[in-house]
Amino acid sequence: MSSITFPYGSGHASSSSFISAQDSTSSLSTVSYEPPNDTSSFQMNPLSSHPPRTPRTSIMSNGSHVFGTDVYDTKEDAQVTHTFEADESASESEDGEKVGADHPRVRKEEVWRELLKSANGRDKALKLLQYSMKMYLVFHFAITASPAFRGRNRPGWEAELTHRLKSGIAGFSLTRKCLILFNWLPPLTSILAQHQSDSYVTHKGKQKPLLHTFLHAPPPVLLEFVNGLADDAATFSRLGLIGKRTGERAGRLADWCWFASTLVNMVENSVERSVILDLQHQVEGRLYSESMSGATSKSNPAANKLDEKELARLQRQDYWIQITRLKLLMDLIFVSYDVFRLKRAKGQVQTLAGLASAVLSTAKLYDRHKSSLIKGVSH
């Protein structure tokens, strides 16, 4: 070896000449390091075993080399970090938040196609149309009833449009009722499955009757079952298959069941949100402790990234729980007018609450189908 060139330019010419002279007579066993003469900027010794905690390329001179933290990671930490980064794109698409660059984007038309395949999706789409038309009529009647338009002759097409909108609203309402026919089958299936799984036999050798299983079923399941039966009876009455008085009584019972189930769902929603917030505070506490302790060469970046992703998932879950709670509140306002037979501003309030409930429930269902499509594309 004739000479060794240090990455500091001409400032190290004397040391390089000295080493070259020594190397011509004998082998070089050790190399001494001399700091550069230029002290205008901070220089980091590249032979040092203690790198800076947050290296910055801008503070090094042009010929120097920056040693990142990956040089000082252990082999096990490097493998964990590499595995995490390799699976990052697939795991991020789990909740529909991000899609990797190598995956095609899901179009809105595809989401609506999947949404309208189900009876629930068609019901939400028709509900949006129904209450949008109702909202238009509310504003129309409010404007025409104002003193500025009172006494004026209205064009003939306006009366025709109003009549068609009312007919369309009634048709959408009946269609939605038909879409949710036999909605009592899922709770009935759940109750029958519980009855079959119950292997309890009395001392006389007789199995407990089915009525006992019905009476001991969870209240939300019973409410859903009775509500489905009452809704079907009211729908059959509108179709002319059952008498009008029977249909009115069934509709009254269905409203009370809807009112009670909405209250139960609001309580369950509050409990679920408290659990989510507790988990969110735990993750935030771990992230805060990690940030206060500082990053070291022994720290694992994969664990920190997993906590950040878990926090984002919990925040997203909490967001949709709040959307569900707002939707339940709109339903409670809507059904309270029918249950307690309130008359004041009934049409305006129910139209506004119904439209808000339709928008919120459709947004939640749309996001669910979108997340399902993104999972299918990513896998």
Image (cartoon, rainbow, N blue to C red):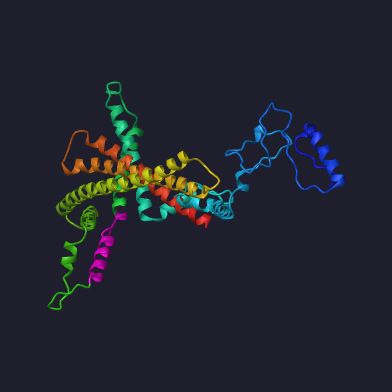
Q: 124 or 280, which is in the foreground?
A: 280
Q: 6 or 171, which is in the foreground?
A: 6
Q: 104 or 294, which is in the foreground?
A: 294
Q: 241 or 376, which is in the foreground?
A: 376
Tell me where the magenta segment starts and ends, as one range.
178-198
The residue that appears at 35% across and 37% down in the rendered structure is 161
For this view, does 190 lie left or right of residue 10? left
x, y percent for residue 344: 19, 33
Q: How many numbered discs, if any?
A: 0
Give the vertical position of 183 relative to 3 (above or below).
below
Q: Is residue 196 magenta?
A: yes
Magenta stretch, main secondary structure class: helix
For this view, does 272 lie left or right of residue 89? left
Residue 336: image quadrant is: top left
Q: Examine the rendering and report whether any part of residue 128 can be seen.
A: no
x, y percent for residue 287: 44, 43
The residue that appears at 54% across and 52% down in the rendered structure is 84
